[in-house]
Structures are given as C-alpha cells and as structure tokens.
Amino acid sequence: MPNQLGPEYVRAIAPYQAGKPISEVAREFGLDEAKIVKLASNENPLGMPESARRAMEAAVAEIGRYPDANGFALKEAISKRYNVPQDWITLGNGSNDILELAAHAFVQPGQSVVFSQYSFIVYALATQAVGGRGIAVPAQKYGHDLEAMLRAIKHDTKLVYIANPNNPTGTFLPPNEIEAFLQAVPKNVVVVIDEAYNEYLNPELQYESTDWVRQFPNLLVSRTFSKAYGLAGLRVGFGLAQAPITDLLNRIRQPFNVNSLAQAAAIAALNDSSFLQKSAKLNADGYRQLVQAFDELGLEYVQSFGNFVLVKVGDDDGAGARMNQALLKKGIIVRPVGGYGLPQWLRISIGLSEENAAFIAALKKVLA
Ligand SMILES: *Cc1c(COP(=O)(O)O)cnc(C)c1O
C-alpha cells in the first residue's frame, strides 16, 4: 500500500539531486578517489581560504558551547562590509536556508510563487514544501524574462525568486532591468534576488543591491559563503532586507541555524579580499579554457557569469545522461541537468586548470 502519510503537496516533491560525491563514484566505477575530478557542485576549486581554516581552529576550543544564536560578530562584519544596519541581516544555514525561510514566511498553501524556467530548482522545492503553487515563466535565451515574470504575477502571488547570475544557465540580468522590475512589482509581493555568484562578476558588472534594499521594503537579497568564499561544507549564507522582513525571518528560523565554526570562518573569509580576488581570477581563466575547447569542438554553450558553464553535448534527449555516464567512467563528475528540462546539456563547474584539462581530454575522447 502506498504511503499516504503527509500532505499531497509534500508527497509530490521530487527530492533535490545533488552532485555525486567523489567517494560514491569511486565505489561505483572502481576508480581511485585521488584521480577523480569533481566539477559538479560549483564549489571553489581552491577549497577554503587559509584564514578561514585558522579561524575555525581557534573556534574549536568552544565547540562544547552553543553558537551565538544572534551571530553578533558575523553580522557586525557583514554590516561593515555592506554598509547596512545589523537588523537587516538574517544568517542562514547556507543561503538555501534563506530561500526556504522566505517561502515559509510569505507563502501559505495554495498561494503562488513566480520564478523562471531553468532557474535554481530550490525555488520550486521551497514553494512546494509550503504547499505553494509554482509559476515557472518561460525563459528567454536561457535567462529570466522579467517582463513576462511581471505579467505572470497573480492576485495570490506572494513571492518572486530571481537568480542573478542564474544557476544552472549562468545568465546575468543587467541591474537596470532588475530595478525596472522592482519599481513595477506590486508592493505586497516579496522579491528575493539570489546572488550566490555575485562575487564572480567582473568589476564592471558589479552593482549595489543594498541600494535597492534601502529603496524597496519588499526586497530580500541572498548571499552565500559556499561559492567564491570556498565554504560550501560549512553551510553559511545570509539575507539582506529591511528590518520588518528580517524580523519575520528571524521568528521562524532555527535558533542556532549557523554553527560556531561556520560563523568564525565566514568572518575570516569576508575579510580575506585577496582570496576572493584569486578565486575570481582563477575562475575567469578557467572559463576561457573551457569555452575555447567548446568552440574547437563546435559545442554550443551559454555565456556564463558564474563559476560553471552549461554546454550542449548532443541533439537528442538522451545526450546529457549518456555523456554524463561516459564521463563518470573516466572519473569526471559533472552535473546532468535533465531535471531542469535541459536533457541535452551538462553543467560543468570551473575547476583548477589541470581539472579543466582532464575534463576536456575526457570529453574529446568520448566525442571521438
Ligand atoms: C549554490 C547556490 C546557492 C547557495 O547554496 P548554499 O550553499 O545553500 O548557500 C543559492 N542559489 C543558487 C542559485 C546557487 O547556485
């Protein structure tokens, strides 16, 4: 008999498909763990900053105690860095936590949430988890069509998720388009701008979303330490919004949602601008390395503003899964994106130069 426990909207959720861990691929394909290259989860190939390691080592001494539930020191560091008051900051167990808190705080069962086709799958999952109705608006050139998203907003729409840059497609929305959207969106609709890859943007593309937070009381910006800051395993991110939104999120978050090592490491990483610069430079070089190979091989890809590239590996709907399997056999883990409705594509996280080279070599062999 099927399990009928729990509401239908929870039973309907398809679980999040994470990138395969190295150990699992080693077991499954009988490979040496040390030779496996993982380019599947948009992690920083440099790993964590040394400054964060030292901060965690110091913080270990106090691990018997609960973390600071208010994250005072980390909020102080974020407040200085982004020039916002501390009561605008919500700390999250990864920015995923912030995205979910937004759905919990603003959406009741049956109400709708607008996001883009091919945008981060967590928006759909967070919506479903609260019994909300997701409205996926058709993408334009693999990116958000903000005008169509505006038109898609219904009377019962409570939340809009925007990813900039977007994952898994890597597309970027220019700030003037986002600002026009924020001006036009009904004031009773909360807009979340997910900026997980912001630190990878070229300086000339950087924009100040905190200015919008000042201007729009219905805006929540989310940021993470998982990507450019190199702390994915710690689970720490944050939201920036005016005090009334922050106050609501604070009421429903777990009291100790960010552990003490994560708080310590995040402060160190935030102040480590040289690590961030090094990461961005490595990423830009790796991007050129990958797209040059795709050009040589005549493979279509989407111009990316993040630390990954979406590449088309065939014309039939089995192409992505087949290529993924062939690469796994060669010890290369990338991300199939069939679950995003992109079965002909793969998402490749940008790695170290030698990791990118290993991927390119394997790709060439499989295609030959
Ligand atoms: C990786 C990612 C996140 C962040 O994940 P956390 O590790 O939970 O901070 C958020 N949004 C997008 C679009 C991402 O790709």
Image (tube, helix red, strand yellow):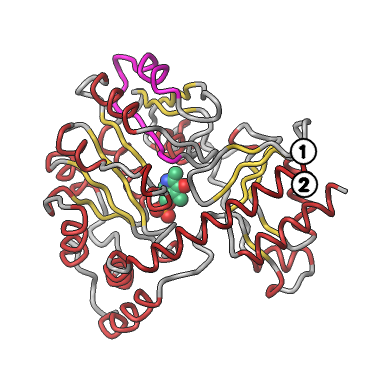
Q: Nearer the viewer, residue 47 or 69?
A: 47
Residue 187 shown in magenta: no
User: Which numbered tag is attached to residue 88?
Assistant: none
Q: Residue 296: give x, y in percent of width and height.
A: 75, 45
Number of residue marks: 2
* Amino acid at circle 1: Ala
Position above or below: 361 against 63: above
Report if residue 96 is visible in the image: no
Position above or below: 182 against 31: above
Residue extending furthest front? Answer: 204
Residue interval drawn in magenta: 145-165
Residue 164 shown in magenta: yes
Q: Nearer the viewer, residue 237 or 287?
A: 287
| Picture quarter with the N terminus | top right
Q: Nearer the viewer, residue 60 or 330?
A: 330
Q: Residues within 10 Å of mark 1 (few under 14, many from 20)?
A: some
Q: Residue 336: give x, y in percent of width and height.
A: 66, 45
Q: Which residue is mark 1?
A: 319
Q: Which residue is mark 2?
A: 323
Element carrying mark 1: helix
> Along the horizontal axis of the image, is 116 left or right of 157?
right
Element carrying mark 2: helix
Q: Residue at x 26, y 48 (%)?
A: 239
